[in-house]
Image: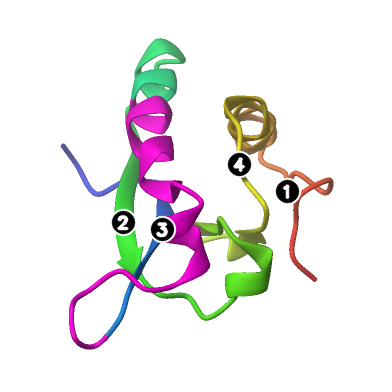
Amino acid sequence: MDKPKHHIFVCASFRAQGAPQGMCHKKESLNLIPYLESELADRGMSDVAVSATACLNLCEKGPVLVVYPENFWYGEIDSEDKVDEILDALEEGQACEDHIIN
C-alpha cells in the first residue's frame, strides 16, 4: 500500500502500562475496526488506513475516532450507522458535523 491519503485512528484506551482502561475500550471501540476496514474495501477507498491508538483522553466522548490529516475528531461513535456517516462525509471531503467533537 502506498502512503495513505487519510488515516482513521480508533481509540483503544491503552494506557502506559499497556492495559486498556478507558471508556472507549469498554464501549467496544475495537469492534469498529473490522467494520471500518470492510466498509472501506466495499467503497473502494484503498487510500485510507485504520489503526487502533492509545487513550486519546476524551473518555466522556467515547468511542472516539480521529481522521488525519484533516484532524476531524468524532465522539460517541458506537454504531455502524455513525461510521457510515463519517465515511460518507470523508468521501465528499468534508467533516461529518453530526459527530464532530468541538
Which comes sooner in the sequence, label 4 or label 3?
3
Magenta residues, start to end: 16-37
Q: Is label 2 or label 4 in front?
A: 4
Query: Which residue in the rendered view is the most extreme toward the bottom?
Result: 16
Q: Residue at x 74, y 65 (%)?
A: 101
Tell me the element at label 3: helix
Q: CA distance from mark 1 to mark 4?
A: 18 Å
Q: What is the x, y in percent for residue 73?
A: 63, 62
Q: How many numbered discs? A: 4
Of label 2 and label 3, which has the lower sequence position?
3
Dot label at residue 52 = 2
Q: Is residue 18 magenta?
A: yes
Left or right for 79, reference 33: right
Q: Looking at the image, is mark 2 or mark 4 earlier in the sequence?
A: 2
Residue 58 position (above or below residue 94):
below
Q: Is residue 38 left or right of residue 26?
A: left
Asked whether the residues under the numbered discs 2 and 4 touch, taking CB atoms below 8 Å apart as contact, a structural biologist would say no
How packed is label 1: few (under 14 Cα within 10 Å), some, or many (20 or more)?
many
Q: Is residue 77 above or below residue 45?
A: below
Secondary structure under the numbered disc 1 in the rendered image: loop
Q: What is the quadrant of the N terminus in the image?
A: top left
Q: Secondary structure beneath disc 4?
A: loop
Please identify the quarter of the rendering in which residue 37 is found.
top left
Residue topped by disc 1: 95
What is the spatial separation of the Cα atoms under label 2 and label 4, in whole angstroms? 15 Å
Q: Amino acid at mark 3?
A: His
Q: Where residue 32 appears, x then y in whole percent?
A: 43, 37
Q: Nearer the viewer, mark 2 or mark 1?
A: 2
User: Which residue in the protein does label 4 denote?
Assistant: 78
Q: Quadrant of the C terminus?
A: bottom right
Q: Amino acid at mark 1?
A: Ala
**Residue at image mark 3:** 25
